[in-house]
Amino acid sequence: MTQKRKQYLAALAGVLLTTGFWIYSLCGHQPIQRLPRPEQGTGNREEELEVRMGEKTYPLEILLKEQQFSEEQVQERLGQTSDRLEELFLNTNPDLQHIRGSVFMPSSDPETGVHLQWYAGSWEYLNVDGTIKNESLTEPVQLQIQVVLELQGEAEDWQRTITIQPPDESVEEDQLRVLSWKLSELQKDNSRELVLPEELDGNPLIWYTGKDTTWLLLGALTILTVCAMKLGEKQEEERTLAERERQMQLAYPEIVSRMGLYMSAGISTRKAWERIVAGYRQEGRQSCNKAYEEMCTALYEMQNGVPESTAYEHFGAKCRLPSYLKLGTLLSQNLRRGTKNLSELLEEESREAFENRKALAKKMGEECESKLLLPMILMLLTILVMIMYPAVVSFQI
């Protein structure tokens, strides 16, 4: 069967069903005088009707009430529910004195239709849905249960006393409980030592002290120490790197200014480089500066046969700062391509570097101010305490 034929058959079936229901509705749309009421216990039912008055038809929705029981039937059903209510309530529990599992607390009897209203002396160990809360119990608890049975205005009371038991104990739990009791009994005398029992119910007992967890503590402390050391090393590296960058940023304007000054005087790039390194060495390196140390390394490379332009590029790469990369590139291009007005470019770079140094100095000053804020606050609090203390003492006197 092709797909198209299946679609035609489905459409035809829908048309036939629609036509059939339409004809059925026309046939069923006949005048009526009687409506069947719902049976007892099934509840009321809403019914949608149409009523014709004169030549007009009006929709009307009515409530069909369920059929009522006779007085004898009401009493009979109340008695039936009262007789079987205990069985319903117990659910899977053996009797009212051994309640451990959930109980059944329906709102009505499914067989007789009697309405049930449940009341308890306390809801501490019983939920309204019938679940038992006995997890924390160590001994049985009694509870009063009351149920009001109601049918067609007639009511009857049903009351029982139930006993909620603690949860079932396993054999091991029961033995441990007995053993704990025995140990407590053994300590009622004034002996200096507790003699542990060697058996329980014929089963030999072997006692041990609690597991020593010192190794866990030592292991955790070792791991924490290693992590702290690694973190400290990382922070120290970051501080060293930050200090190195700060030194280079502060030294850059001076280096560029000297290079521009020497080259403006007609000295070659390498000679100017050598003079700056020589001046740094003559100062005795009282304060080791990373920028000048990198210049010394570049000079060593030149003296060992490394091309001058390559040594400048290595210098900029090792410094790892944009300004030094730019300086190394300028000096290298000057040697390879003969850049014009290099001294002017260095002078302009020097002015820009000094401006950056001013900004850096301002930033460092602001950081110092923020670091001094806490000591200043502590000093202020100390002064306030010194001033207020005599006044407070005098008021107390």
Image (tube, rainbow, N blue to C red):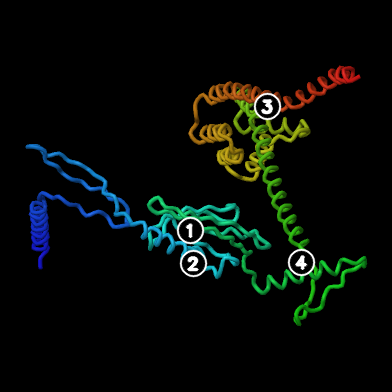
Query: Is residue 71 shown left or right of residue 360?
Result: left
In the displayed structure, 227 sits above or below 322; it is below
| Extreme residue in the front direction | 72
Q: Residue 105: give its label.
A: 1
> Which residue type does callout 2 highlight?
Glu
Q: Quadrant of residue 213?
A: bottom right
Of residues 309 and 240, the one drawn nearer to the viewer in this rendering: 240
> Which residue type does callout 3 highlight?
Glu
Q: Residue 87: give its label.
A: 2
Mark 3 closeness class: few <14, some 14–19, many ≥20 residues within 10 Å: few
In the displayed structure, 275 sits above or below 9; it is above
Foreground: disc 3 or disc 1: 1
Mark 1 closeness class: few <14, some 14–19, many ≥20 residues within 10 Å: many
Q: Position of residue 40 (x, y in %)?
A: 32, 57
Q: Earlier in the sequence, mark 2 or mark 3?
A: 2
| Extreme residue in the bottom direction | 202
Label 3 vs label 1: CA separation?
A: 73 Å
> Which residue type does callout 4 highlight?
Lys
Of residues 106 and 231, the one drawn nearer to the viewer in this rendering: 106
Q: Residue 211: give its label.
A: 4
Q: Position of residue 95 (x, y in %)?
A: 56, 68
Foreground: disc 2 or disc 1: 2
Residue at screen point 11% across, 38% down:
53
Q: Residue 56: give its label.
A: none
> Which residue type does callout 1 highlight?
Met
SS state under label 1: loop
